[in-house]
Image: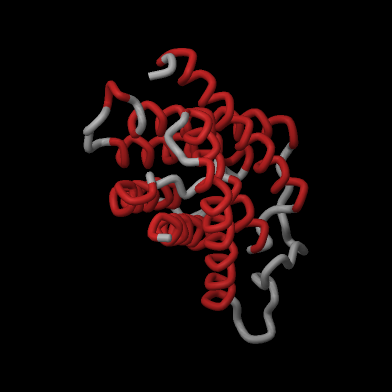
C-alpha cells in the first residue's frame, strides 16, 4: 500500500502542476522540476513512476512486479482526476463552469499525426532515460536519476509541447481531459502513443542491455 500512496502523491502533484503552470512562462521548468523532486522524494519506495507508460516500460524490463502494475495505474489515474477536481475548485469562479470536470466546450485538438509522432518520441525518451538511469546495473546507486528524468520532461516539453500539448504520460492526458483542456480524441492519442513509446523503450533497453 505504501507504494501506491507514493504513486498517487507524485502523480497528483505532477498533474496539478501541469494544470496550474501550463502556459506559464516557466511552465515547462515547473513541470520538469516537480517530477524531479517527487522522484527524489518517493523513488526509493515505489520507483517514482507517476506515469502508466513508465510503469509499463519498467514492468516489461522486469523491474516492476506484475501484481503492482494495475494498482499503480489506478493510483496514477485517480491522482490525475483528483488533481483536476482540485484545480476546478481553486480556479473557477461562481457560476462559471469553464473548468468543471469533463466540460469539453473549449477543449483543444492538435493535429493527429504530428501529435502521435512527438508523443511517441518524447515518451520513448522519457522511459529510456528512466530505465537507463534508475534500473540499469551500470548506473546502480547513482543519485542523479531524478534530475535526469525531470529534465527529460523539461526538454521534451520545450521541444514539442506546442505540437501535442506535451503530455508524455497517459495519467497527465487523463488529467487535462478532465480539466477540459483537450478533447477525447486527443486523450486517446496520448494513451496510444505514450504506451507505445514505453513499450518500444523497454524493448530497446533489453536489446542494448540484454537480460541483465
Q: Is residue 99 above or below residue 143?
A: below
Image position of 126 with respect to 137: above or below: below
179 and 76: which is toward the camera: 76
Quadrant showing the N terminus = bottom left
Q: Is residue 66 left or right of residue 63?
A: right
Q: Where is residue 165 shown, x and y percent of the image?
A: 60, 45
Question: In the orientation shown, which residue stands out farthest toward the bottom?
Answer: 94
Residue 144 x/y as whole percent: 25, 36
Residue pictured at 66% horizontal, 62% vertical: 178
Residues 50 and 187: in front is: 50
What colouring style does the render use?
secondary structure
Asked whether residue 17 appears in the rendered view, the answer is: no
Toward the viewer: 60 or 101? 60
Position of the C terminus by quadrant: top left
Residue at the spot 50% in from the left edge and 39% down from the top edge? 54
Q: How many marks?
A: 0
The image shows residue 154 at horizontal and vertical percentages of: 42, 40
Write the residue at 33% across / 53% down. Answer: 42
Q: Position of residue 36 (x, y in %)?
A: 34, 46
Residue at left 58%, top 56%? 74
Q: Is residue 201 visible?
A: yes
Amino acid at each position: 500500500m505504501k507504494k501506491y500512496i507514493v504513486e498517487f502523491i507524485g502523480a497528483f502533484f505532477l498533474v496539478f502542476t501541469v494544470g496550474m503552470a501550463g502556459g506559464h512562462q516557466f511552465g515547462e521548468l515547473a513541470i520538469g522540476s516537480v517530477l524531479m523532486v517527487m522522484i527524489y522524494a518517493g523513488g526509493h519506495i515505489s520507483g517514482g513512476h507517476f506515469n502508466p507508460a513508465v510503469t509499463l516500460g519498467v514492468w516489461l524490463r522486469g523491474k516492476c512486479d506484475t501484481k503492482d502494475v494495475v494498482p499503480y495505474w489506478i493510483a496514477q489515474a485517480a491522482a490525475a482526476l483528483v488533481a483536476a477536481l482540485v484545480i476546478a475548485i481553486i480556479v473557477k469562479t461562481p457560476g462559471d463552469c469553464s473548468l468543471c470536470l469533463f466540460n469539453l466546450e473549449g477543449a483543444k485538438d492538435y493535429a493527429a499525426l504530428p501529435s502521435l509522432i512527438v508523443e511517441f518520441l518524447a515518451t520513448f525518451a522519457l522511459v529510456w532515460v528512466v530505465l537507463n538511469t534508475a534500473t540499469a546495473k551500470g548506473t546502480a546507486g547513482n543519485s542523479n536519476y531524478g534530475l535526469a528524468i525531470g529534465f527529460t520532461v523539461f526538454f521534451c516539453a520545450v521541444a514539442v509541447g506546442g505540437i501535442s500539448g506535451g503530455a508524455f504520460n497517459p495519467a497527465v492526458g487523463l488529467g487535462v481531459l478532465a480539466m477540459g483542456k483537450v478533447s477525447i480524441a486527443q486523450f486517446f492519442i496520448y494513451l496510444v502513443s505514450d504506451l507505445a513509446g514505453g513499450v518500444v523503450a523497454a524493448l530497446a533497453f533489453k536489446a542494448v542491455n540484454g537480460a541483465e
